Image (tube, rainbow, N blue to C red):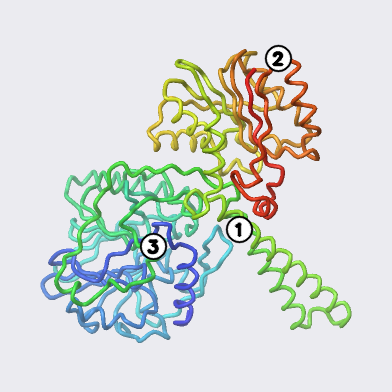
Amino acid sequence: MARKDSENQKRSMSAMFRGRAIFKPLNTGHIDERVSCVREWVANIFFYTKNGTTLMIDAGYNYARLKEKMGWIGIDPASVRHILITHQDTDHVGALEKDSEQLFKDAVICIGEIEDRYLTGEVRRKVIHGLYRLPLVKTDNPKVLLKDGQILHFGDIKVECILVPGHTWGHMVYLIDDEYLFTGDTVWFGADGGYSFISTLAEDNKLAVQSLEKLEKDIRSRNHPVKIITGHTGWTDDIDFAFRHRTQLCEPFRKKYYDPSAPYDAYEEDNDTEENARNIPLAKVSPLQNVMKPDYRNWVPESMVIGAAAGSACAFGLAAYIRGSGLVKDRVTKNILSGGLALTGAGAAAAALWLKALHDAFSYDGKRQLAKQIIENTAGYVQLPAGGKGLDVGCGSGALTIACAKRNPQAVMTGCDIWSGAYKAVFTKKVCEQNAEAEGVSNVCFEEGNAVHLPYADETFDAVTSNYVYHNIAGHNKQELLLETLRVLKKGGTFAIHDLMSEARCGDMDAFIEKLKKDGYEDVRLIATADGTVMSPKEAALLGLGGSALLTGRK
């Protein structure tokens, strides 16, 4: 792995993780009189010094400023004779590679015997759910291969090796002098406690969680204060905080992590200065109170954008390979194949750009926040009496249910959904409940319920509502679906149903409204929301939301 690969990772990882509060590295400096660290972009290298002996824990990126920053904390690279490696990832072994500055060319690498299989090339390191293989690391340093539970002594420094597979197959953590636990990429500290490390970078997430549970039991059983020091998110001496969410994964592309102290882009290190390194101790992680933040997800998940972009890249790459290789001999066939793949790549690229535009528009945390505006507009039409009950059909992540509950604190809102199909990994009952808790809303409940046949008796609710649900239900007459929702509405109850209600999708809505009026419904209106009320006609057309309208009235 050349230095340029470290630079490439800096660019790609910066683009991927900025704004997500995932990487929160310590700046260069001292934790205490024994432990100091160097910051390399998002990663930390640690040094443990006692009675003239210095151990290095991990070797960071192939990083040009390592010697300079070691000077800030008063450590000479030549004084490092042994380096403990937690695992072989790009940001943990770079200073040992053949094409590095070779600051530690004579140092002995201490690495788990299982982890060493990555260095020998016997096993290749895979990330992003096995889709990408990291470059092979090449080093000439002498090695000591370690086993689980092995005890090492360097002068009067004691090191205990603890195997914690999952992030990689042979990941080790090191307990030094029974007081300092260097965890590498085993645990990730969020603002509300520790989680199993980043899910997209693990070989086996289930195994990682099991290893973290085992590690917690081990450390607690010792009944000894321990400083727990991570590779990317700081340190703590609060064991309860460190393992608070040990059964949960840090899932950067499925959850928005709220931490106002996290840098927007942790690869920017302008605030890592020599003056601070020499004068300001590195504080432990300070748990934030009430850090839960609602996560209403996105109608166009980021995974869809990434998938389209990846498909485009693959198609273009395959087209280039066919053109440049001798795989296809016939020139005409080669041109047809490569041209077809190039067109496919262009189509996928266009789809990715369109999906990105949708994702940005619908994001609750973005500038446009269209989804939030639509939800709030619809909720404004839902009015419930004291002690009343409302129903949100197809509640998804609970956004509309909770918005209605906020506006009607004297009543109870029920959100129902089947939470299946294309969105089942994004919208779930648990997500709804977490969002209600984060919003501090208790007058809600969430249940399974299919809009085609609602599991409620006639005239159960004082209000019914829904947002962009019926057009997604294939094979069913949309007006019949609307009547099924109105079936469970009490006499005198109100309804506010927002959807794509063009004639092509829902039939003649004017005739449908007249039918409702003949059946006794009052104040029935179809209010366009793509006429500038919520979005402009141009924006609605761009986002595929033409025909958006709100059906309101009273039974």
The amino acid at mark 2 is Gly
| Secondary structure found at label 2 | loop
Of the pair 66 and 58, the residue shown nearer to us = 66
Question: Is 145 drawn above or below residue 320 in the view shown?
Answer: above
Q: To which quarter of the image does residue 456 belong?
A: top right
At 23% from the left edge and 72% from the top edge, which residue is drawn? 55
Answer with mark 3 or mark 1, whichever residue precedes in sequence: 3
Judged left or right of residue 152, residue 508 is: right
Q: Residues within 10 Å of mark 1 (few under 14, many from 20)?
A: some
Q: Which mark is residue 520?
A: 2
Mark 3 or 2, which is nearer the eye?
Answer: 2
Pointers 3 and 1 in contact (CB under 8 A)? no
Q: Residue furthest left?
A: 51
What distance separates the C-alpha of mark 3 from that of mark 2? 56 Å
- Residue where numbered disc 3 is placed: 264
At 14% from the left edge and 67% from the top edge, which residue is drawn? 156
Pointers 1 and 2 in contact (CB under 8 A)? no
Q: Which mark is residue 348?
A: none
Mark 1 or 2, which is nearer the eye?
Answer: 2
- Residue where numbered disc 1 is placed: 357
Answer with mark 1 or mark 2, whichever residue precedes in sequence: 1
Mark 3 or 1, which is nearer the eye?
Answer: 1
The amino acid at mark 3 is Tyr
Residue 510, given in percent of the width and then of the height, sits at 77, 30
Residue 400, given in percent of the width and then of the height, sits at 53, 34
Of the pair 553 and 13, the residue shown nearer to us = 553
Residue 28, given in percent of the width and then of the height, sits at 25, 71
